[in-house]
Amino acid sequence: MKRRPDTALTLGSTLVLALLAAPGPAQAAVRAQLGDHGDYSRLVLSVPKGVEPVAVVDGCVLRVSAPDPLRWPLASLRDSFSRRLSDFVTADGGRSLTATVPCGARVASFMERRTLIVDVGGPPVPGVKPEVPGDGAVEGLPDAEPEVARSVGVAEVVEALNPIGTANAAAMILPLPSREREGAQAQLGKGEGECKNQGAPCSDSPSPSPLRGSPPSPGAGEGVAPPLPVVASLEGEVRDSIQQTLRQLERMPERPAKPVPQTAEPPKPPAPPPIGAMDLAGWAGDDFNRTREALQRALDTTQGRARVEAQLALVRFLLARALDEEGRAALETAASLSPAPDQRYALRILGDAFRALDREDAPDDNLFVQLPAGAMPDHHVWRSVALAPTRWTTAKEGLPIALRRLLDYPADLRSRLLTTLAAAADEAGDSTALNLIVLEMITVDSKGMADGRLDYFRGRLAELKATPDAALERYDAAAGLRRGPFARRAEVRAIELRRNLGRLDEDGAIKALEALRFAWRGDDVETDALAALGGAYARSGRTDAALDIFGLLGRRFGATARGRDALAAGRTLLTAVLDRLERSPPGGLYALALQARHGRLVTLVDGPDGGLRLRLATLLLRDGYGLEATRILHALTEGATGPRRAELGATLARSLIDGGREGEALDVLARTGGSALEPALAERRALLRADALLGDGDTVRALDALRGLSGAEAARLRAEGLFAAGEWRAARSAFAELAATGAEPTADDLALQGLSAYLAGDAESLRGFGTAQRARLAGTRWAGLLDALAPPPADGPLRAESVERDLAAATALDRLARGWRKTP
């Protein structure tokens, strides 16, 4: 027999298991709805009983805070689309819900029992008219009878009142008298939003937003019921009202048609909020170690948003202490902690400050440059520092405000910023601004600049004021410290200044710079010493050593943090090398060695205009290395625009024509042309096109391209075209008239003139030509031409072999002339 289980025991066990499985106190759930309306977006949160959340807007962030943790419906909110509410995130352990809203948006919130309603409208857009209704509804106040009737056409009213056409007349909405209108409004009810039954909802449409103002009255064209039928007893009163309205319309002057309203442009995205003041002295703290330990303890004991705030405090501390490398690492750590939108904006501001501290090349996307500075002194400081290395003219506009504000900055940061401003003013040659910066250095940082920095910039200021003896005195004072980069930099400047003054010869300068180079390694001052040493090598004729120094600059410093300074030093050295090569005789190998060994470094060192590469290409063309020159010119032409592109295209076409590549030259001229060119450049390009066509064998098009062109070059090309076309007499006359243009005929011109006379059978002209030009052709490659073209003696018999020999000589000379015409 089976044993039945005890019912009481079973119930007790079940109760114990239920108690053990029951969870702890759970967070209350929140229901949410999100939707977009015409002018605003609405967020509706249904919260538990007794909870009163508060909605606050901070910049571009909407924060809904509650006293206790809640379970926010993040999944449903993120799945819902809204134009003005996005990026829903919970924070503070579930006590708050944050969302991104348009910066400057109009936000209104109110509680309705247990429901929090938040309406987010767009930022106010000035100068935008409200949209005109497109349904043809009459706008205006109910009592404005003449205005309402004015929108009804006179012909339509007459047709509606015509008893003959009553059967075919269309239904019309006629203005009712005041009594009937009041009765009709009474029949419409109390108005939108009110109901006779308070317990039932009035309609399914959302209630009007408080951001849009109160809804229009029913008589204003919205929510009006269908037109009421005109009662027969009121026909006479309605007819009198219409006739009175018609008489008023006849007395009123005609108004011009109302222009169609223009569609308002979409509002521009809101600008970022302004940058606030910085408490850099408070961020730095009085004691470095104690402040850093306190910030580290705050990082170890916080979570969530508070941890991001603690990391932000650490970043501010590192900025105030001018610790740029540690500051960038702290910024990356803060970005990995999922900061809120307002915290991300603060991190971007601090990141832009560190970029300015590091002298970045492209400050256009820096917030301190993009946003107007206004009256905020800190903004002027960082704007000037960000723009100083590249755009000093713009940077010095806020310099007086920046210098006054820097007096309150911590010493380390003030020293770094003043150094950046002084270096930029020195590079721009602005002695007035550099004088103001040096005076502030003397006033507040004379003790903190004991590394020779102050004496170095005072020496630079003395040089700008053309007092070299005072500059040498300051440089020697700085170099006497024997430590720090500015002491060595001052020593380099002193050597260069003494050489320029003639107090030190080239060999002495080389020895001093070589000693400095090998005595001081591993700092950015070595770039200055190397550039000065390479320039001395170039001036003394040791071009190989100068090229080695140029390559060393690129290999050692081109990829480091000091790369920009190294490239600037390399630009100075490359200019000195090119100056030396331009003064040397043609035919050397140094230009080719510079392009072959350091072509990539030359491209990096060169400026945006490509001036140094163009000089190198000119040297290569002069020395006969057309292939390397055309490669450089191709790269420069493809990167240029406007008239600069047309000018470089002409230079490239000239090099291609000289190399026998006339077809490529024509293609280059076609791709680099333009309509708005200067007359001189346009004429130069036309001559190049004619020369290329002539070299390509298209004589007819070449002569056609020369029409309307004057000058010696056009006359020479026209004569060569006639010679190539076989027009011997015309070619002889054209070459003879070449001297009339004021140009001195070359040996090639004289030789072609003699050949034209010979092939034309003009013995008399050939005889006179030989007498006049024999001395000018002597010593050239055409020296034996006149003997070959000499006619046979007149008294001897004409033999067939002599005629054949003369014809063969003429044919050979014609081929020779064609081959030599473009060969140097």
Image: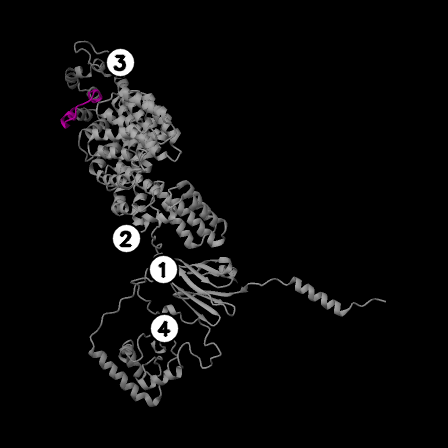
Q: Earlier in the sequence, mark 2 or mark 3?
A: 2
Total numbered circles:
4
Q: Quadrant of residue 7?
A: bottom right
- How would you rate the neighbour count of disc 4 (Cα within 10 Å): few for under 14, some for 14-19, many for 20 or more? few
Give the foreground label among 2 and 3. 2
Residue under circle 4? 214
- How would you rate the neighbour count of disc 1 (Cα within 10 Å): few for under 14, some for 14-19, many for 20 or more? some
Q: CA distance from mark 3 to mark 4?
A: 113 Å
In the picture, measured across the screen, residue 145 lies left or right of residue 45, that is: left
The magenta span reads: 736-753
Residue under circle 1? 104
Q: CA distance from mark 4 to mark 1?
A: 22 Å
In the picture, measured across the screen, residue 199 lies left or right of residue 416, that is: right
| Residue 805 numbered mark, or none | 3
Q: CA distance from mark 1 to mark 3?
A: 98 Å
Residue type at mark 1: give it.
Gly
Asked if residue 485 is positioned above or below residue 114 in the image, the reply reads: above
> Closer to the camera, 188 or 631?
188
Q: CA distance from mark 2 to mark 3?
A: 95 Å
